[in-house]
Amino acid sequence: MKHALAFAIVLGFMAAVLLAQERHAMTGVVLSVDRPGRSMVVSTDAVPGFMAAMAMPIDVRDASMLDGLKPGSRIEFAYVGDGKTWRAENVKIRGVENLDRKQLELQRLKVLSGIANPEAARAVTVGQAVPEFALTDQAGQRVALSDLAGKVVALTFGYVRCPNPAYCFRLASNLGELQKSLKDRLGRDLILLTVVLDPEHDQRQALLDYARVWTNQPNVWHFLTGPPADIRQVAGSFGVEFWKDEGALIHSLNTAVIDRRGRLAANLEGNAFTAAQLRDVVTTVLKRQ
């Protein structure tokens, strides 16, 4: 009888502890990872009724939950706490979201290409140096990555005739928001690049007109073109695949951030992250010396 009573008391205590805890399903973009400190900094999405979107440090109980996480990784997790202490549990990297049939085909093609040709040049990973490249911008000026040493670079890909507003337009719009929110850093220590993937059509006046839609500062936001082989090489460095299909150009969606030393600091895949999350990623890299 005493054992049964003690067991019931323990169960009651455990139930009270569980009831006192809050659990919230959360998503966000990783800004940095501190394995020794068992924590990460995440630019979170808003959770209605709980918290607004923000960049915040989050602890984990077990450092193994941080395995595979890199700046730019989009994750989901349970945020668990009692009002005083909080931690992340069940941290998982989310797959590329919001993709239509053509984008799903492209993702499968990337996987199959890697299997068929494992010796092919691989995309740069976070922390590695980005290979040198030189292309021509909307003003006809040569822009080389090495010329931008000492500055943080935010780079994306697109093309003028892209018909899907959720793709090239959204990625360019994210850079447009950076142009506004970090205007005091532009040119001084932040440069924006858009590499156009259809050099056959996106050149001269078409490229200039497209660039003017987004910026009146061609010295800080360069829209780059060049020979197709050079474009494909640059795209491949960031894991971007593209091909023409029924008059359109299908390409994977990537936004990269390069640090002051020319190393890849983050590579955000897809289009599900927000402009504010990209700003948080870039701001984190800007703070590094």
Image (tube, helix red, strand yellow):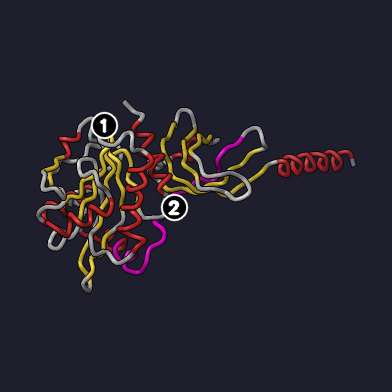
* Nearer-the-camera pick, 256 or 67: 256
Above or below: residue 217 compared with residue 115? above
Which kind of residue does numbered mark 1 sit on?
Arg
Q: Is residue 101 magenta?
A: yes
- Asked if disc 2 and disc 1 are in contact, CB closer than 8 Å, the reply is no
Residue at left offset 31%, top offset 38%: 265
> Could you say whether the residue bearing mark 2 is in a helix, strand or loop?
loop
Determine the residue positioned at 41% across, 54% down: 272
Q: Position of residue 57 (x, y in %)?
A: 50, 34
Where's residue 78, x and y in %? 57, 46
Residue in view at x 27 percent, y 32 percent: 189
Mark sitting on residue 117: none
Seen from the viewer's position, the closer of residues 41 and 87 is: 41
Nearer mark to the viewer, of 2 and 1 = 1
Q: Is residue 116 left or right of residue 8?
A: left
The quarter of the rendered structure image containing the C terminus is top left
The region drawn magenta spans: 86-106
**How far apart in space, not on screen, are marks 2 and 1 (Cα)?**
34 Å
Residue of label 1: 188
Q: What residue occupies the far front of the structure in this picture?
A: 216
Q: Where the N terminus falls, by quadrant?
A: top right
Q: Which residue is mark 2?
A: 94
**Quarter holding residue 51:** top right
Classify residue 2 by image quadrant.
Answer: top right
Give the secondary structure at mark 1. loop
- For label 2, the crowd category at 10 Å Cα-Cα, with few meaning under 14, some 14 to 19 and many 20 or more, is some
